[in-house]
Image (cartoon, coloured by chain):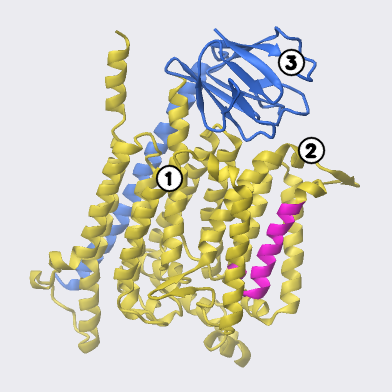
Amino acid sequence: MTLDVFLLILRLLGIVLLYLFLMQVIISITRDLRKTAAANADSFGKLPPVVGHLIVVDSGPSKIAPGTSFNLNPQTTIGRGPTNTIQISESFVSAEHTRMWYRGGVWYVQDAGSTNGTYLNNQPARDALPARVGDIIQVGFIRFKLAQ
Amino acid sequence: MAKQPATSEIGRRHYRWKELGLLIVPFLILLLEMFQLPLAQYYKASIDTNSQLIPFSTSILPNVHDLVPILGLIAAIVVVHILLNIFFPKADQMLFPIVALLSGLGVLMALRNGPDASTGSDPNLGSKQLLWVLIGLVAFLVTLFALRHMDWLRRYKYTWAVLGLVLVGITLGNALRVKNLDSPTHDQLNFGPFALQPSELLKIIIVIFFAAYLSENRDVIAEGGFRLGPLTLPPMRQLGPLLLMLGISLALFLGVRELGLALLIYGIFLSMLYLGSGKLSYALGGLAIFFLLGFVGYTLFSYVRSRFAAVGLNMVNWQAWDANVIDFARNGAGLQVAQGLIAISSGGILGTGFGLGHASALVPVAQSDMVVSVLGEEFGLAGLFALIGFYLVLIYRGFRIAIEARDPFYQLLAAGLTSIFGIQTLVISAGNLKLLPLTGIPLPFLSYGGSSVIANFLIIGILMRISHNTALEREGLA
């Protein structure tokens, strides 16, 4: 065997390995896609569960009547934009105002970069703050009570 | 009661088996190529002295010492993999193996190009690149740890914009100081042994600023400000910062002669504007303005014209070239492209074999700008396709992370950072293949260059942190 032949074998082996890796990556991508497709099929048509409520305590300058109740999903966004779970069409509410999520039995409240801010019990919620039932959440100038 | 099995199940599920499985073949590829390199050098040296067939014997096989650079890199990658397992079990598992392979191949290319490199020949290119990759891995981990709460990226968006402007100022000032705009390194800043390119950091900062700005104003921008016949223009007040960014890319384009960087920034701007507003008309309008500016540049600047002239080279009918064209391809701006294409064509389908091509000695700046032609010659069409496949998968994963992210800011950030890779790969490989004017931007991970490698690892770090945060948030659902 000459060196030429040995180098040719190495070269072919290298290309085979490159494509083996590409195949491996693509197989795991298709698996991943199937899994997400199955997960989406499972949740298709099912509404996200309601795990809590926000009850308006003080409607501020807005037209929302005090006592109005909003459903809370495990992932809830509040804002003026059309993509939010709870949409509030008031000029003092930012397009994406507040994010709330429920993890391990605890609610978390975080401001989503709003202009007028989000407050939990009068504390600014720039970083995520844990909230309990009965706490007062202020979105812009509207105050809500967190309820079961 | 029900909680106990749940936690143990989560604990089992969280070992990053997929990542480990995907890392094995890249390690084999890197070791194989490293093994092949000394053999190829021996082969080349012997073929120069006598043209007879060289017999194969085990005595010429490289020993473990020759494999040290790659063994060290593999060890570092394994350490990073273990750290990812401990601290970020839910981050995306496909990005890191691909990045490990690409950056390892980058080190191999530098090792291979170093002794041969035609310009600025530096035999230590390989060990330098290895050092940069190791620093990049550290930067990658630091990014993952530092971005625990990513909201500060969004909150200080104008700080980022100012920092970006400062970087542009430094680049421009440096270019004016150096004056020799034809040297390939005129946009570097030298700090002792380190040469930094502020432009590499600039692209990340620009994406962060765009993502923060667009996620806040996208409703207004998507609505459109006023109408001009059938056209809806973005509102002027929200257009301000975007125009500023256009100004930056033009300033670079004119001042530093960075055609590639201007192209990249404008490309990022267009793709993020489209992703943020969902309006195809803005992207098409921006593209029209781009072609207009390109035409203006073409008529005003001779160096732009010469780059376009290289695209017009007819390589197949080289017998029909007249003296002017021959001079252009031999001594002029056509040299790089012409030599690169000859190299790629000599590689054929399977390539000449790693370390056995001539591109790195004959093509100017083969180690960074023209690395595609070296790859094309030594790995052939088959290898080039595989590499393009890896980049496609990398970009696919990036956009997937963007889709899965919950917050518009993270979506735009991930998509914008991914489009950096996409645009860079497209522009530089199309430039090498004479489909676009050749511009000096690096091929992600494969081109030699410290700042570029570190910036790429920062991008991967941010992407993996976003995917980890998304998974953590989703876990709150269950």
Residue B195 appears in view: yes
Image x and y of residue B370, in percent: 46, 72
Q: Mark 3 — residue?
A: A59
In the foreground, B422 or A111: A111
Q: Main secondary structure of the magenta part?
A: helix
Q: Which mark is residue B442?
A: none
Instruction: Give above or below for B250 relative to B160.
Output: below
Q: What amino acid is labelled 3 in the image?
A: Ser
Outermost residue to the bottom:
B323
| Total numbered badges shown on the rendered structure | 3
Q: Mark 2 — residue?
A: B223
Q: Which residues are magenta?
A: B240-260
Q: Is residue B242 magenta?
A: yes
Colour in which the image shows chain B: yellow
Give SS at disc 3.
Answer: loop
How far apart are labels 1 and 3 at the CA level? 39 Å
Residue B230 appears in view: no
Circle 3 chain: A
